[in-house]
Image (cartoon, rainbow, N blue to C red):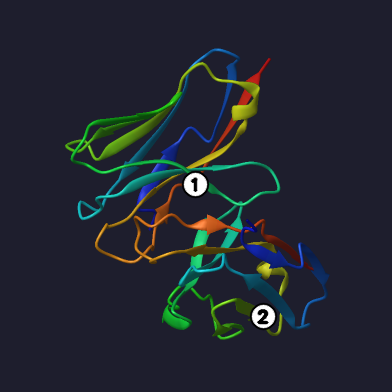
Amino acid sequence: QQQVKQSPQSLIVQKGGISIINCAYENTAFDYFPWYQQFPGKGPALLIAIRPDVSEKKEGRFTISFNKSAKQFSLHIMDSQPGDSATYFCAASKTDSWGKFQFGAGTQVVVTP
Amino acid sequence: DAGVIQSPRHEVTEMGQEVTLRCKPISGHNSLFWYRQTMMRGLELLIYFNNNVPIDDSGMPEDRFSAKMPNASFSTLKIQPSEPRDSAVYFCASSFGGMSTDTQYFGPGTRLTVL
C-alpha cells in the first residue's frame, strides 16, 4: 500500500526553467512533509520540509507548496541548474512520532545546459 | 566533521553466503536507521534504534535479516543466508533525537549484489 504517490517519475528541464514535482498522501494524520535530494552514488539529504500550518515554504530556489484539503504537496525548483540534476523524494510522517517516513517513489530530474 | 560512515561501499557475494554491513553514525547522534533502496520498492525503512535499543524492526523482511547496535558508535546489519532478491543499496542514517522532525543524515550506502 503506497501511502505517498509521487509524480512524474522523471523529468527533463532546460537550465533556467522550473521543475515541478507532485506528491499526494492518504493518511490525514501526516503532518510533516520533507523533501530529500539524492545524487548518484550518494545517500539522500534533507532539502526542505513543511508542516501543514503553512501553505508555502521557500528556501532559495526551492519552494514547497502545500494543499491540505487536497492532501497534496509539491516541490518547485526555480531557475533550475545542471547541479540540480538528482533524484528527489517526497516523504510524509507525523511530527509526534519517531522518524518513520512514508517515501514517494522518487523523481529523476535532469537539467540540460 | 565526518558524516555517517558505511562499509563496505560495495559487496558482491554468492547466494547463501553471510553478509555483514557496517555503520558508524555521526558522533553524538542517538538514533540510527537502516534503509534499503531498490528500483522496485523505493526507499524502505528496515529498523530503527534509539539509544542503541531497537525500537521498531517491523520493516525487516524476514528472519534472515538481523541488526545490532552494541554501542553508540557502531551498528551492523547482517543477512544470512543471502539471496539474489536482497540485492539493493543499503543506507544507514543517524539523527539527534530520532523524531520525524529531527534531520536524518544518510551515509553513502552499501551496494549489495547477491549472485
Quarter of the figure that contains the C terminus of chain A? top right
Residue A35 higher or lower than B4, as above or below: above
Q: Position of residue A19 (x, y in %)?
A: 49, 23
Q: Residue at x 61, y 78 (%)?
A: B74
Which chain does the residue under circle 2 lie in? B
For the residue pair B52 and A22, the one nearer the viewer reads as B52
- Same chain assignment for discs 1 and 2: no
For residue B115, say whether it is visible: no
Residue B39 higher or lower than B44, as above or below: above
Which chain does the residue under circle 1 lie in? A
Residue A23 higher or lower than B47, as above or below: above
Q: Position of residue A76 (x, y in %)?
A: 42, 26
Which of the 4 image quadrants contains residue B73? bottom right
User: Which residue is identified by label 2?
Assistant: B79
Q: Residues within 10 Å of mark 1 (few under 14, many from 20)?
A: many
For the residue pair A101 and A48, the one nearer the viewer reads as A48
Quarter of the figure that contains the N terminus of chain A? bottom left
Which mark identifies residue A38? Answer: none
Q: Amino acid at mark 2?
A: Ile
For residue B71, say whether it is visible: yes
Q: Residue at x 63, y 70 (%)?
A: B24
